[in-house]
Image (cartoon, grey):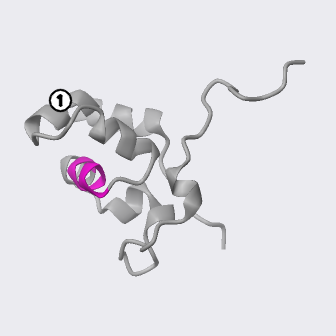
Amino acid sequence: MAKKQDLSIAKIRYLLSETGYSFTALDRKYNLRTQVCRNAAECANIKGEHVIAKTLKLHPKDIWPSRYDARGKRLKPQPYDNYIKKPIFRQGLKAA
């Protein structure tokens, strides 16, 4: 069975916009530090994950399966790859 992939930042941003929120609006609404929700969409951050999941009315496991086990419990410790920001727009690759 193929491993389920995490939702992309763009997809999460789109789903939030459908509910009338942005990452910044969620930070303000839940009194989180700036960029907590934005960073949670990309790297493991439990507070941001729960705020986003609550807003989207989904379980965090459905948004980020790599951060949770099959029963829905958060992995402790998180796999190292969950703390690495993925390059956007092919950053860090060799030029042609």
For the N terminus, the image quarter is bottom right
- Where, by quadrant of the figure, is residue 33 drawn? top left
The amino acid on which the numbered mark 1 sits, given as a three-letter code, is: Ala
In screen coordinates, is 75 left or right of 38?
right
Residue occupying image coordinates x 29% and y 40%: 37
Residue occupying image coordinates x 36% and y 33%: 13
29 or 84, nearer to the observer: 84
10 or 83, nearer to the observer: 83
- Where, by quadrant of the figure, is residue 73 drawn? bottom left
Q: Which residues are magenta?
A: 46-52
* Residue 89: x %, y % from top left: 64, 24
Q: Residue furthest right?
A: 96
In screen coordinates, is 87 left or right of 51?
right
> Relative to 34, is 55 above or below?
below
65 or 95, nearer to the observer: 95
Residue occupying image coordinates x 57% and y 60%: 80
> Relative to 40, is 72 above or below?
below
Task: Indicate yes or no whether the magenta region holds residue 12.
Answer: no
Residue bearing mark 1: 25
